[in-house]
Image: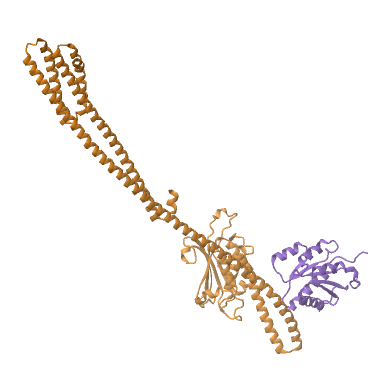
Chain colours: A orange, B purple
Amino acid sequence: MKALTRYLPDQARQRIAIGFITAMLLIAIGFGLSFYSYNRHNQDNSLSRRTDFVINDLNEILSLLKDVETGARGFVLTQDSIYLETHQAALPVLPKHLKHLNELIVDNPAQKQRFDSLGKLVQANIYRTNQLIVLSPTRGNWTQVKSYLLLGKMRMDDARRLVAAMISVERALTQTHDQQANQSFNTTIITILLLSVLTFIVLIVSYNVLEAELTHRQRVEDQLRGYEAELKAKIQQLETSNEELERFAFVASHDLQEPLRKIQSFGSILQQRSQQSADAETGEYMSKIMQSAERMSKMIKDLLHFSRLSAGLGSEQKTIRLNDLVRRILADKELQIKGLNAKVDVGDLPVIKGIPFQIEQLFTNLIANALKFIRPGVAPRIQIKAETIDGNLYPELVSGQAYTRIMVSDNGIGFDEKYLTHIFQIFQRLHSKTTYEGTGIGLAICKRVIQTHKGHITAISQPGQGAVFIIILPEYQQSLQAYDNPIPNEVYSYPVS
Amino acid sequence: MITPFQTRFIHILLADDDEDDRFLIKEAFQRQFTNCQVSTVDNGEELLVFLNDYDQDEAFNRQLPDLILLDLNMPRLDGRNALKVIKQNPAWRHIPIIIMTTSDASPDIELSYLNGANSFITKPATFQQLTHVASVIGQYWFDIVTTCNHTVEK
């Protein structure tokens, strides 16, 4: 039952529950009715048995009365005491039968009345026959004897009528009773039959609902299985094509380098020769060839770098102290920073989990960009700071999850935000090659790194107003206490004046 | 052109499957050093054959090469395996081997040094850079560094 409730939708669950509860109620009612009917049947049986007893008793009483009467008559005629034997035998038995009969019919007032009359009749007859027996030997008063005998006959007739009436009443009573019992038995049977049919129907309906639900579920599950298999196949396909693509990029850029190197090598020999022969035009063309070849070489190297990045070489996640990392990058760029008279402020940066060389590349590129796209005559100022935010701030992130937002802001030339998606694409540039050098791979690499770290990268800028590059990474959950040998992350500026 | 630092004849053996590279490297060394002979082979197998046959060749004064320039990617026997074979052979393992290849992948670099390479140089892009590399190699191995005396005792 529990297993069912876990898997079935509410509506179907309710229907099935109602179905089964109804079926159980119907079965309970059927059982109750059967029990009731059985009891009734038992009662009816005992009732008809009682009727039999009553009739039996009545007949017995009548027969005893006859014995008493005939005994007395025989004695009166013959004066032989042999006739008194039956009379004497019947006398003690009669009250027993009367008592028994009284018990049987005590709850029927009409019968009771008749019984009382019969009882009086019996008493009177016993008294009368006794008188007759006492009177008869004398033979003196024959008229009296005769009247006694007549009275006995009349009383016997009365008794017979009474007994017949009582028997017929009892019979009628039993008959109506039997009729009633039969009727109620029939209705009970019909009711039980109806209930059974109803239970069957309810069970069949419930079964149908359950089966429909299970079939439906099976179909849905089959469908899901199908989707799953399809999805798996698609993922595999994607993985394969992705792998192929990355391999292609790697091989292509690797193999493309080879002929290019030849162009450059032999070109440089020719260039030397043209310088010696002092042919100015040839020299110019040669240097154009050489410049293009060099540019292409750089792009191929960048492409190779980019494809290696996504190939995930050495992609083991480690804990990275961003403050240490940024300090190291700034130390590498110390000469450039001093040369530009730039000021770099680094706030309190968190510890994150990431692939060290990728994260280093990310920050190196962002800092290099900030030092590259500077406004002439304005001392570069770079700020790096971090804060914790919730994922609901950006639609690209998982809402309710904590993220670290790191902002790298500069006071450089900035850019128009309509180029926001443009700048993160590989080999896309906003400025001419002569104004700012580079192949346009830096931010593409940044984006790739952020993607592999399940974060988000964006920027805020206006032309001439500087730019803020925002990188968002999942917050590192492990408690800092587990971190060995903690060094306080002090805020520092670079260069130290 | 740089004057040779030693009066003796210097023999460099270059193993590279690329004809143009063989030409460029040979050219770069011979432009830098007048007393330098660069022999070339196409692959690792030929390299081993060449080393086996060194004493048959009178021209090199019964000497093993002073230096081997070895490309990694070559047909038949590649540079990685040729390097292992040479560095495991007691008669040859004193010869300095400089890997000169297009690869700059870190596993290649690491494996080369582990197998006894003396240097690892990624082939430079321009001829100027290549002649510079040649002059640095020559200065280093034939002027600064003292190498073994590999005259064969008969």
Is residue A155 left or right of B91 when viewed as pictured? left
Q: x and y percent of residue A9 in the render?
A: 41, 56
Q: x and y percent of residue B138 in the render?
A: 81, 72
Is residue A429 left or right of A81 when viewed as pictured? right
Outermost residue toward the right?
B154
Is residue A78 left or right of B23 when viewed as pictured? left
Viewer-side residue, B54 vs A226: A226
Find residue B122 and report its image quarter. Answer: bottom right
Q: x and y percent of residue A472 in the render?
A: 52, 65
Q: In this view, does A150 lie above or below A241?
A: above
Q: In this view, does B122 lie above or below A268?
A: above
Could you tell me which residue is drawn at 84 percent across and 75 percent down?
Answer: B36
Outermost residue toward the top?
A138
Viewer-side residue, A23 vs A8: A23
Q: Is residue B97 above or below residue B31?
A: above
Is residue A197 left or right of A493 when viewed as pictured? left
Q: x and y percent of residue A88 in the render?
A: 19, 15
Q: Is residue A203 above or below residue A170?
A: below
Viewer-side residue, B30 vs A86: A86
Residue A497 visible in the shown view: no
Could you tell me which residue is drawn at 9 percent across and 18 percent down?
Answer: A148
Viewer-side residue, A417 vs A308: A308
Find residue B27 and report its image quarter. Answer: bottom right
Q: How many labels does the image show?
A: 0
